[in-house]
Structure formats: structure tokens, C-alpha cells
Amino acid sequence: MIYIQNAAQLATLGGAGNKPKTGKEMEELGLIEHGGIVIEDGIFTFVGSDEKARSYVEQHAGNRQVRVFSAEGKTVTPGLVDPHTHAVFAGSREFELNLRLQGAKYMDILNAGGGILYSTECTREATEEQLVAETVKRLDRFLAHGVTTIEAKSGYGLRLEDELKQLRAARRLDASHPVDVVSTFMGAHAVPVEYRGDADGYVRCVIEEMIPAVAREGLAEFCDVFCEEGVFTVEQSRDILEAGRSWGLKPKLHADEIVSCGGAELAAELGAVTADHLLHASEAGIQAMAESGVIAVLLPGTAFFLMAKPADARAMINAGVPVALSTDRNPGSSPTESLPFIMNLACLTMGMTPAEVLTACTINAAHAICRADVIGSIEVGKQADLVMFDAPNVLYLQYHYAVNLVDTVFKKGEAVIQ
Ligand code: NIG
Ligand code: FE
């Protein structure tokens, strides 16, 4: 039995039912001052005031050993959830920074055979073991920043065997690392060089060869497409996501990242689980997302790193779109594992409140990967993933910015960082 004692503030994020939080609900953190938590067999079995937690322990411990962790002066939150990463890849692209500082655009670099295509070359050359070894370091850094679950996309293989290799690496990491890894197939991340000028041919390959192979091996739960001018059109994206759905892969979409091209509208039409990026989502697209319950996964770190104007989070929250946040961890547009820094950016560059960002990185992020029944809040019966921050209250997390305030991390009831 584990007893987390006397947290200065305990943000449970509980009580939301089985829907992501929207509008004003995003401000409701289920805060308990002087909170206590009990964990048994990796599950939360008591959450409430410290006084009641103490008597729960006295009544239920019997002759079991009780390990006490003092949270005196600390803020406790659910383990952070990152619902959008491209964390499994080989190589890195730091040389692109100078190009971009001299004015090269992200899409120009991609069109010149760099960007995603460069990372694809490196990833194709790597073995599955090498991918696992490179990604372990990233998962370690995620965990050190309080992230206990991530989603990870393929999309640097861009041909069958290498897409499978990426997804198999993700599956091995999920099984062997404390951070849980939820997989998304994103063969439609770019048109590979062998199909240059024949995007339709590549789309056919994704639909006819890759999706069935990924689904047969049970390697992914979601399917994602980079729907963008010059990459995949709305029609191609629709075809891919519908094919994915027919094989049991739930749709997600990189939508309206660089230009407004109907991505948000498509996500709404398909009833996608999420639409991500949305820097240039139209008003009608946002409205349509609200109506069909699509979660917006916003990535202010990517806007920051590409020196672009971030998404209009306030318009989305006001329209009733549930918002989640993510690092977008990838080698080109967002090389960071610091979800807490992304939370800082969400406040400071998108005007989200500290309470909204915490909701967006916990319970709403859990909904964005269809895991809200097990993670995303500190509630009796849920998996005991939590973070203890060296911060007196939740506001402080967004005030003392760009440093790592993580003190202790529990994953499935085990103290994995302390
Ligand atoms: O979400 N936009 C497409 N994909 C990634 C970037 C991938 C890369 O540059 O390697 C993104 O920003
Ligand atoms: Fe992405």
C-alpha cells in the first residue's frame, strides 16, 4: 500500500464523466487542498482529504507494509499524457535551424527532399533495435518531465517494411518502458521519393498494402494523415482514413497546419477522434468540430519552433471544442519532450489559463487517445499514474516557467522518478 501524504494541492481532474471537458468545465480541476491518496496494486483506492486518507490507511492496511511519500508543499496532478508524437525515428535535423533562420520555410525544406524525407532516409537505414535504443532516451526524458503515456506515430518509413519496423519498435517500447506508448499508423506523412509526382499511387499503396498489414499485425489503434496543401489533399485524406476505419483504425488528422485547406471540416465530417495543429482552421471548421465532438490537439511548441502564429485556442474553447495539448515531439518541427514547457507556451502564447492547460494535458489528452477510462485523472479505480511537482499550487506550474519542477513520478503505482 502506498500513501501519498498531505499534498499542498491535489488536482484530481475527476468528476468529468466519460466525455472530454469543454468550455468552462476545462477550468474545473477537482482541486483538494491538503489532499491524500492511497494506491493499492497499481490502482488508486482512496482520493480525498489527507485526514480521510490517513484513516483509510489505518483501517485498510492490516498487516501490509505502508510506504509513505510526503507531498508536503507540493502539487500533485495525474500523470501527464502526450497525445501526439512522432517519437520513434532515427537521426536528427539540427542543421535545418540555420536554414530556417535564413528564411527557408518548413515546406520548402520538405519539397527539396529534406525535412520528413531526410528523417525517412535515416529511419529506413536504422534497425528496429537502433530505433528502440534511440527512442528509449526520448521516453526517459518524457518521464523526467512528468509524462506517463504518449501516443506515437509511424510515418518515417513510408514503405511497408519500414512503417512496420517503426510500429514494432513502438510496441516493444510500450512493453519495456514505464511510459505507455499508444500507436498510430501514419504512412501518409509525406509522399516518399519513389512516388514523387504520383501521390495517388502512394495513397493506393497506403490503402491497399500498408493499412491491411498494420491492422493484421495489430500494430496500431489510430490512423493519421498529413492533410495539407502540397502533401495529401482532403480527398486523399478521406480515402485513407475511411480505409483505416474499415480495418478498425480510428481516424486522426494533421489539419490546417500550414494553410487552411478544409482539414478541420474533414475531421468533423469523419467524426475523427482528434484534429491536430489547426493553426489555420476556419471558423466553420471549428464550429463543425464542436458539433461533432472532435478533440482539438494543439501544439504551441511547433508554432513556437517554426516561428509561426499559434492556433486560436480561445476561439476553439469558446466554440465548445474540447482542447488537448501535446509536444508533437518530432525531429523537425518540435524537438522537445518537455510537455510542461508546452503548457507554459499554451498559457503565454495562446492565452489558455493554467487550469485549462492542466485539463488539456491530462483528462482531455487521455480522451484524445481513447484512454480516459484508465488514465487522465486521479480517481478511485484508475491506474495510479501521478506527478508530484515542486510547486505550492497549480498556478505556480505556469508561472515558474521553462524549468523542470517534477519531483516524483508514479507509473502504475511505482515510483519511477524520485
Ligand atoms: O506534426 N506536420 C507534419 N508532421 C510533423 C513534423 C514532422 C517532421 O518535420 O519530421 C508535425 O509537425
Ligand atoms: Fe505531428
Image (spheres, helix red, strand yellow):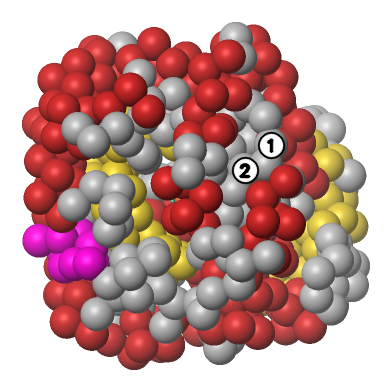
Task: Determine if the magenta segment contains residue 263.
Answer: yes
Give the percent coordinates (x, y) of residue 142.
70, 45
Task: Determine if the magenta segment contains residue 94.
Answer: no
Which amino acid, by three-letter code, is at mark 1? Ser
Residue at 56% from the left image edge and 33% from the top image edge: 119
Q: In the shown orientation, is residue 239 left or right of residue 259?
A: left
Residue at 47% from the left image edge and 44% from the top image edge: 112
Q: Residue 331 carries which label?
A: 2
Residue at 60% from the left image edge and 72% from the top image edge: 307
Magenta stretch secondary structure, dominant = helix
Whichever of labels 1 and 2 marks the residue nearer the N terminus, that label is 1
Residue linked to disc 1: 92
Q: Can residue 374 be seen in this view?
A: yes
**Quarter-of-image position of residue 293:** bottom left
Give the percent coordinates (x, y) of residue 179.
63, 35
Q: What secondary structure is marked by label 1? A: loop
In magenta, the rendered stretch is 261-269
Q: What secondary structure is marked by label 2? A: loop
Q: Quadrant of the N terminus?
A: top right
**Tags 1 and 2 touching, CB below 8 Å:** yes
Image mark count:
2
Q: Is residue 18 visible?
A: no
Residue 155 to residue 333: above or below: above
Q: Does any atom of ligand 1 lie closer than 8 Å to the CB of label 2?
A: yes
Residue at 50% from the left image edge and 28% from the top image edge: 120
Which amino acid, by three-letter code, is at mark 2? Pro
